[in-house]
Amino acid sequence: MIDGLSFSAWITAFELPALAGLFWLAWRIRRDGEAALARLSARLDHDLDRLREALAQHKLDVATGYASLAALQSVEERLTAHLLRIEAKLDARGQA
């Protein structure tokens, strides 16, 4: 063998520690990846909850702050009727 090292000594001295190091490295990468994924998932859930609350608040603001179409039509009809009355009064004064 190589400089008096037998095959079993080679495996014991070099390959087993190298394989153990690779196993430890793979295990650590997996653990760190799972931890990062858990943090990202928690952050995403938190941000999604905030967005849902903001959307619900915006919908509430829109529902309470803006007039409905029926209300706008009613106001338009009243304004038109009032303007027509004013116009009729001005026409009556102009003819008199």
Image (cartoon, helix red, strand yellow):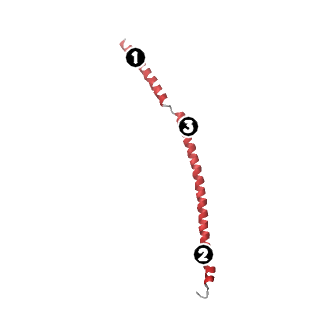
Please give left or right for residue 19 compared with residue 67 in the image. right
Q: Where is residue 30 in the image (x, y as percent from the top left)?
A: 59, 64
Label 3: element kind: helix
Disc 1 to disc 3, C-alpha distance: 43 Å
> Which numbered disc covers residue 60?
3
Image point 47% across, 31% down: which residue? 69
Q: Residue furthest left?
A: 95
Residue 22 in which image quadrant: bottom right
Image point 44% across, 24% down: which residue? 77
Q: Earlier in the sequence, mark 3 or mark 2?
A: 2
| Closer-to-camera residue (60/13) | 13
* Mark 1 or 3: the one toward you: 3
* Circle 3: residue type: Leu
Label 2: element kind: helix
Q: Where is residue 2 in the image (x, y as percent from the top left)?
A: 58, 86
* Circle 2: residue type: Ala
Q: Where is residue 1 in the image (x, y as percent from the top left)?
A: 58, 87
> Which numbered disc covers residue 18?
2
| Closer-to-camera residue (21/61) | 21
Q: How crowded is mark 2: few (under 14 residues within 10 Å), some or many (20 or more)?
A: few
Disc 3 to disc 2, C-alpha distance: 63 Å
Q: Earlier in the sequence, mark 1 or mark 3?
A: 3
> Which numbered disc covers residue 78?
none
* Mark 3 or 2: the one toward you: 2
Image point 63% across, 80% down: which residue? 12
Q: How crowded is mark 1: few (under 14 residues within 10 Å), some or many (20 or more)?
A: few
* Circle 1: residue type: Ala
Image point 42% across, 18% down: which residue? 85
| Closer-to-camera residue (43/88) | 43
Q: Name the residue under label 1.
A: 88
